[in-house]
Amino acid sequence: MSTSEKWIERGLTHVAKTYGRYPLVAQSGKGCWLTDVDGKTYLDFLAGVAVNNLGHCHPKVVKALQDQAATLIHSSNYYHIPAQIELAELLCQNSFGERVFFCNSGAEANEAAIKLARKYSFDQGHKERNEIITAQASFHGRTLGTLWATGQEKIQVGFAPVMAGFKHVPYADIDALRSAVGPNTCAIMLEPVQGEGGIHVAPKEYLQAVRELCDKQNLTLIFDEVQCGMGRAGKLFAHQHDNIEPDIMTLAKALAGGPPIGAMVARNQQAESFGPGTHGSTFGGNPLVSAAALATLKTLLEDGVLENGQVMGNYLWQQLEGLKDKYDFITEVRGRGLMLGMQMTIEGAEIVKTAMERGLLINCTAGSVLRFVPPLIVSKDEIDQMIVILDKILSEI
Ligand SMILES: *Cc1c(COP(=O)(O)O)cnc(C)c1O
């Protein structure tokens, strides 16, 4: 029995069965490469589901974590936290935002956004306005609130009662959105690029029309950038491509380069409604995770990582288009930056499994969309290596 097999067997007994895990037991990582406990290496184009934007164990993130861990790991939000303050400043300096609430995950960031949108509406004297419109095929998380905010029935089955206050409309359909807005609507929540739903990019005209609708009807616009933010889509935040700003933005996944974090960035107008005692989190933005996030964000901004992500995104796109020309079961390449999807007419699960056996980590969303979200530090050579492995697998279909 290999070391991997031993861990896999032990994992069957006491760990919750919530994930259909692949037979990989990761031991270490460096850049775009992951090594398992038996010494096999994998080219990682999943990057911890768009978390490791700086690759595995980026030296600056490691250093920040080591230094902070040796100084102060946790103190609580009863007290002020320098790294958290600096992180909030940097996020606001680089976005529309004016105030940041920190938590521990994407779902929590969206919970904060939902609560703030409702509280803001309440504070304006609109007690009846508490409904939030989201998109079909969206993904906003797995907590009881975000589960019902998500526009996917498959993650809701068995968790009745349906939580009131959410309405779902087709993505990128402005007429559907306009007719869904009613006297009880307080906010619209959208991913500028849908991730789990199959990599769908909202057209600029759509986002513009949504912004106008929100301005006209006094609705709060929330962008969920948990996946497409932090440089993933080629700009620090995906909505910056089109210069259409929300009132609230949620972040998580790549924000701290691996350690768990979530953030809700808001304008002061809305953020005023989160006064002392209205919301909170024990761990949110603690010294350790804030230090990691600060190092991650500085590196993203200063070391040409965003630029590399954009250039490599274009290169990967071209290579995927090459595969599309070659195989008629590939119908479309789409996405932005290094958040790319390849739509196929066949299921992707087998391809993902075979790729893993051959040392390549990719993933499939929405059944038939191969998703490519490598670290933003990926090189041309690594993309070429990925394409060689994938091409070979596709040629065998
Ligand atoms: C992953 C994801 C979430 C949920 O984040 P968790 O950290 O798993 O709670 C929410 N929204 C989007 C767009 C995501 O991709």
Image (cartoon, helix red, strand yellow):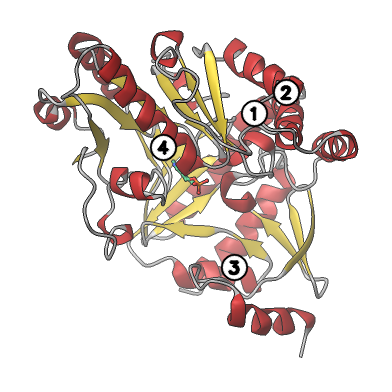
Task: Identify the residue at the far bottom of this view.
Answer: 1
Instruction: Tell me: 21 left or right of 198.
Output: right
177 and 287: which is toward the camera: 287
Tag in front: 3 or 4: 4
> Is residue 342 visible to us here?
yes
Asked whether mark 4 and ligand 1 are closer than 8 Å, the reply comes as: no
Q: Amino acid at mark 4?
A: Glu
Q: Amino acid at mark 3?
A: Ala
Between discs 3 and 1, the one toward the N terminus: 1
According to the image, label 3 marks what residue?
355
Mark 1, other Cα within 10 Å: few <14 / some 14–19 / many ≥20: some
Q: Position of residue 150 (x, y in %)?
A: 32, 46
Q: Secondary structure at mark 4?
A: helix
Mark-to-mark CA distance, 3 and 2: 44 Å
Do the numbered discs 2 and 1 sit on residues whose CB atoms are within 8 Å?
yes
Q: Secondary structure at mark 1?
A: loop
Mark 4, other Cα within 10 Å: few <14 / some 14–19 / many ≥20: many
> Is residue 204 visible to us here?
no
Between discs 3 and 2, the one toward the N terminus: 2
Do the numbered discs 3 and 1 sit on residues whose CB atoms are within 8 Å?
no
According to the image, label 1 marks what residue?
77
Q: Amino acid at mark 1?
A: Asn
Instruction: Tell me: 287 left or right of 103.
Output: right
Mark-to-mark CA distance, 2 and 1: 8 Å
Between discs 2 and 4, the one toward the N terminus: 2
Mark-to-mark CA distance, 2 and 4: 23 Å
Asked whether mark 3 and ligand 1 are closer than 8 Å, the reply comes as: no
Residue sitting at 38 percent across and 49 percent down?
198
Residue sitting at 42 percent across and 36 percent down?
110
According to the image, label 2 marks what residue?
81
